[in-house]
Image (spheres, grey):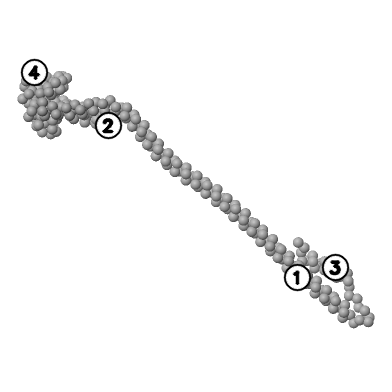
Amino acid sequence: MTLSSNVLKAWAVKNGMKPIRLDPQDDGKGQVQVALTDAKEAAMNIVTRAKEEARAIIEEAEGEANQIRQQAQAQGYEQGHQQGVLEAKQQVMNQWSEMAQQVQHVLNKIEQLGAFTKLLEPELVLAQAAALAGKFIENEAMHHPDSLRTYLTDIIGSLEAHQVTLFLSPEFHNTLEHLTKNWGDLWSQVKVAVDRSLENLAMRIETADGEEFLVGPIQALSKMLDEVLYGSV
């Protein structure tokens, strides 16, 4: 773009090459009028050109400002987009980490359960057998108490004690006391007594030196499971 100052200089040089000449027969008004007209025209041209230059400068400035604004917006969008992506990734990682911890916690429990199951497996077999035996013995004690002879004889025979007391629940005592008198020499060392704290059809043995043994199948099963689950009791 040509600056207005250059336009003024160009006009001055152009019109300076044509000085006003006065004709003796003319009072000079014509040339002066022509010069004024030319000057006015040149001034209008300068104003018009100045306006055009000013408009061009403004448009250029607006264009540059708009370009800068767009670049800033684009840069800001890109930064915002990148920041959003980073935050989203971080959020996903946090959620995944939390899920992974929960899953690992469950896996740890499953692993512990697997080890516990291996430990418990033989005890479960015994527990099932004891439960079945308990049901059988309870039924036999109610209807055929004499069939308990082998069960109780084996238990008492395994004890290294010369005198034992067999404590029975009241229900058990009523049906079993008179039968033990005819169960052989081994039972001569057995004293039968009632323990009202025992549950129905429950038994326990106490030796002369104070040792106690649960001999009822249900109590033995419960104690065995407690040992498996909670250690020695």
* Mark 1 residue crowding within 10 angstroms, few (<14) / some (14–19) / many (20+): some
Instruction: Please report whichever mark, 1 or 3, sits nearer to the chain's N-terminal start.
Output: 3
Q: Is residue 168 visible?
A: no
Q: Position of residue 39 (x, y in %)?
A: 82, 74
Q: Quadrant of the N terminus?
A: bottom right
**Does 112 sit above or below residue 26?**
above
Mark whose residue sits in front, 1 or 3: 1
Could you tell me the amino acid type at mark 3? Val
Q: Distance between the Cα atoms at labels 3 and 4?
A: 155 Å
In the rendered image, which residue does mark 4 sit on?
A: 184
Q: Quadrant of residue 179?
A: top left
Q: Pointer 1 and pointer 2: residues touching (CB < 8 Å)?
A: no
Q: Quadrant of residue 219?
A: top left
In the rendered image, which residue does mark 1 sit on?
A: 47
Residue at 32% in and 30% down: 116
Q: Residue lying at the far top in this picture: please name it.
A: 185
